[in-house]
Amino acid sequence: MMTKEELEAKIESYCSRITYLNDCFELHKLMINSQKEYISEINEFPAFYQLAEKSFIHVCIIELAKLYDYGSEARLEKLINICEANQNLFFKKFHNDITDCNTDEIVRSYDIPVDIKKDIEYARNKIENIKEVILNLKGQRDKFYAHLDKEYQKNPSSLITDYPLNYGDIKELIKIATLICNAFYQDLCRTAHMCQTSNWNDINNVFERIKEYKEMKDKEFQKQIEELKKREAK
């Protein structure tokens, strides 16, 4: 059995992990899409760009697999079991008061029922319904991201054929993990986690600073050329 504070900390740890891997996933996609607008800037640091872009998706797959791997100590199923064993810690209902914005008087009160058993069942059903996607996630993790299989090292494209997993699948896995953890957290604390940092896309600032630097250097170069032309004209 746990205390409410211990269970709250446990759920928060899962939410933090989801936030981390979600940021990595979104950053990976952003870096891929940034090639359309910032290819000139990317060419200023191609080795770092390639390493960072691949590292983000690598971390995402590894961490996401831990949430859904039945053999992982950090899997969602374990959190579900913990919540099931500590159902007495959750709210039974939320009480709300609606007040008049002018007088601050309560004009209406009502209760919102909390059904932790229903949310536990919902969580297990959501995981059960994506078993095939989870198997493909684990397959890619085991054969490529965690341990590079010689077969897939020679022919990486066959990995997608054997264990199909697209961006939509990854997004759905992250979404389900977020929904499950937030359902439990809301039942326990009456609040929820965003599971994405507000400045996850600040890498655009890096591209913009490089762009501004290149533009400044181009202007300086053009200025030097113009001055050289003027001297030669004399």
Image: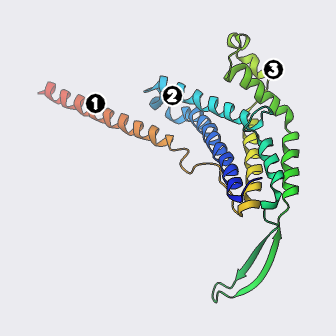
Say if residue 206 shows up in the picture. yes
What residue is rendered at 31% in x and 33% in y?
217
Residue holding disc 2: 49
Residue 146, quarter of picture: top right
- Answer with mark 2 or mark 3, whichever residue precedes in sequence: 2
| For residue 147, side relative to residue 131 (left or right) | left
Residue shown at 79% from the left, 31% from the top: 71
Point out the tag, 2 or 1, that comes first from the N-terminus.
2
Rendering colour mode: rainbow
Residue drawn at 73 percent across, 79 percent down: 97
The CA distance from mark 1 to mark 3 is 53 Å
Answer yes or no: do the residues labelled 2 and 3 have beta carbons within 8 Å? no
N-term mark: 1 or 3: 3
Task: Determine the secondary structure under disc 3.
Answer: helix
Residue 84, image x and y in percent? 84, 52
Q: Which residue is mark 3?
A: 162
Q: Which residue is mark 1?
A: 221
In this picture, residue 158 sits left or right of residue 216 = right
Viewer-proximal residue among 194 and 167:
194
Whether residue 129 appears in this view of the structure is no
Name the residue type under label 1.
Answer: Phe
Residues under labels 2 and 3: Cα distance? 28 Å
Residue 88 or residue 145, whichever sits in front: 88
Location of residue 78 by image quarter: top right
Three-letter residue code for mark 3: Asp
* Residue lying furthest left: 234
Q: Is residue 80 above or below residue 62?
A: below
**Amino acid type, callout 2:** Tyr
Specify the label residue 193 is tagged with.
none
- Which residue, as the protein is rendered here, is positioned at the far front? 1
